[in-house]
Amino acid sequence: MNQLFCLESYLVISSFLFVIGLIIVLTKNNAIQIIIGIELIFNAAALNFVAFSYFRPHVTEGMQLSGQIFAIFVIVIAAADACAALAIILSLFRVFKTTRIQNINRLRG
C-alpha cells in the first residue's frame, strides 16, 4: 500500500479535532467560541465519514461516494446550526449587551 496517509492517520487527526472542539466547548464562556468548538466537532465527524468511506474494502459501484455525501450533509447541518446559533446570540447581545454565557442567566418577559 503506497499511500501518503493510512486510516489511522485520519483517525488521529479527527480525534485531535474532536478533543480540541470538546475542550473549547467545556472551557470557554463566550458563546461564539462555543459555536466554533461545536463546528470543530462536526468537522471531526465529517472527516471520519470520508476516511472510513475511502478505506472501506469491497465497495460496490453505487456506494463509492457514500462517506463524502454524508459528510456534505454533516457540513450543511453544521452550517444551519451555526446560522441559528448566531441569530440567537445576536438577539441575546441586543438585550444583554454581552456574549458571555455566565452573564446571561435570566430571562426577560
Image (tube, rainbow, N blue to C red):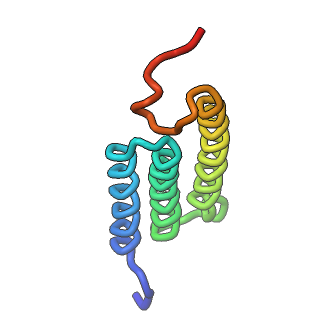
Q: Which residue is pictured at 48% across the width and 47% down the height?
A: 38
Q: Which residue is pictured at 59% across the width and 47% down the height?
A: 78
Quadrant in the picture for the C terminus: top right
Q: Eyeballing the image, is 92 above or below 33? A: above
Q: Quadrant of residue 64?
A: bottom right
Left or right: 22 as drawn, with respect to 4:
left
Determine the residue located farthest toward the front in the rendered image: 97
Q: What is the x, y in percent for residue 84?
A: 65, 36
Q: Eyeballing the image, is 63 above or below 24? A: below
- Say which of 85 and 64 sits in front: 85
- Say which of 23 and 46 sits in front: 23
Q: Which residue is pictured at 43% across the width and 22% down the height?
A: 105
Q: Quadrant of residue 93?
A: top right
Q: What is the x, y in percent for residue 51?
A: 47, 66
Q: Eyeballing the image, is 96 above or below 44? A: above
Left or right: 3 as drawn, with respect to 71:
left
